[in-house]
Amino acid sequence: MDKETKAPDTPHLQPHRSESHGSEPRGSEPRGSEPHRSGYVAIIGKPNAGKSTLMNAILGTKLSITTRKPQTTRHQIVGIHSDEDSQIIFLDTPGVITPEYELQKAMMASVQRAKTDADLILFITDPTDSVPGDEVIDLLRSIQKPMLLIINKTDKARPEQVEALQTFVEKALRPKNTLKVSALRQDGIESLMDEVKRHLPYGPALYSKEDLSEHPMRFFVAEFIREQIFLLFHDEIPYSCTVEVIRYQEQEDLDRISADIIVNRKSQKGMLIGKGGSAIKRLGIQSRKSIEAFTGRQAFLELHVKVREKWREKEGWVRSLGYGE
Ligand SMILES: Nc1nc2c(ncn2[C@@H]2O[C@H](COP(=O)(O)OP(=O)(O)OP(=O)(O)O)[C@@H](O)[C@H]2O)c(=O)[nH]1
Ligand SMILES: [Mg+2]
């Protein structure tokens, strides 16, 4: 398994918020030897800027799904980085957009929640894209928290693109500092982490130091299936689907998983299934492989397609399908 898809040796993914692992109150200068820092860091930016790729690069494991298509991430994804003298809880978020339907409203609610929870904001930008629009700048201006500007994709951006973006954002938002990285190539991550730590309050670990996230395994399974839908289907299909894991049963030799793919319109069901079931078969194989790469265990995966007319537009459905929680 390569680094991108390597499942952590001992994945601690279940909720496991510990009471406190130290005696110092958060924020105060510690007495004694090793000062320990902890805090929440929200990763915010336009769709496709590389937020999820950055979080995965920091954690050294693929926790958050990433694709070339914008609006891949729909939830706030928690990724915990612990070392001897710090614990940093990263919050990956959906890309900032002006929402048009209920699902997008729920996505933006999770950005708002992350910005409220955060001690520090990483504003991640793509110099090869147009400069951030008013909806992004206004949202960041409304946050009264320290902010670092992260210029991503330095492996493919031209120096003049980087400079133009840096000048524009530094003038608009006055970040504490600007760092240049390539999340994809994992360049600049160490300096970024040093800078992040410097801006976090002193305090004890908030989770067990072995924890990597707080979402249950079935959440990740649904995300990996959704990622494959983004990769294998085109046009409106990825944006019309969601995935619900109906059964996740760990057996001794393999995990038995049953999931529903929910589509927005009846006509989309046929597209997902494909001629003679070919499309859903391919989706099943690809999804199973990525789930197995994450868990390090064999899986048996069963997929069914269900129609929920206009679920994306209906608040009740959007909520009951797990968005905006
Ligand atoms: N060349 C290059 N591509 C990158 C880099 N970081 C991310 N990408 C690519 O940019 C695309 C989007 O990456 P994501 O991490 O999914 O972006 P995101 O900001 O999480 O996107 P949303 O969840 O849709 O808002 C993917 O194809 C990544 O491989 C980078 O440093 N260099
Ligand atoms: Mg993302």
Image (cartoon, rainbow, N blue to C red):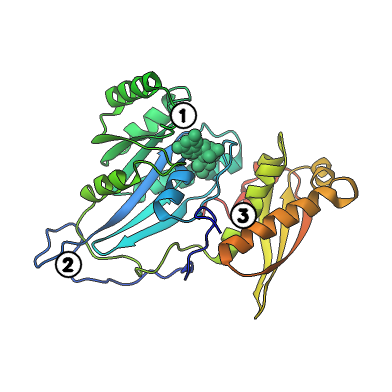
Q: Is residue 47 visible?
A: no
Question: Residue 221, position in %: x, y?
Answer: 61, 60
Q: For the residues marked 2 and 3, what is the alpha-carbon distance in whole angstroms?
A: 39 Å
Residue ID at (23%, 62%): 85
Q: Pick whichever, 311 or 126, lies toward us.
A: 126
Q: Are marks 2 and 3 in contact (CB under 8 Å)?
A: no
| Left or right, 247 with reference to 210 | right
User: Which residue is identified by label 2?
Assistant: 24
Name the amino acid type tagged 3: Phe
Question: Residue 25, position in %: x, y?
Answer: 18, 64
Q: Is residue 308 visible?
A: yes
Q: Earlier in the sequence, mark 2 or mark 1?
A: 2
Q: Pick whichever, 27 or 284, lies toward us.
A: 284
Residue 87, quarter of the rendered image: bottom left
User: Which residue is identified by label 1?
Assistant: 156
User: Which residue is identified by label 3?
Assistant: 224
Q: Up-down: is 181 above or below 244?
A: above
Q: Nearer the viewer, mark 1 or mark 3?
A: 1
Q: Earlier in the sequence, mark 1 or mark 3?
A: 1
Residue ID at (44%, 33%): 153
Q: Secondary structure at mark 2?
A: loop
Q: For the residues marked 1 and 3, what is the alpha-carbon distance in whole angstroms?
A: 27 Å
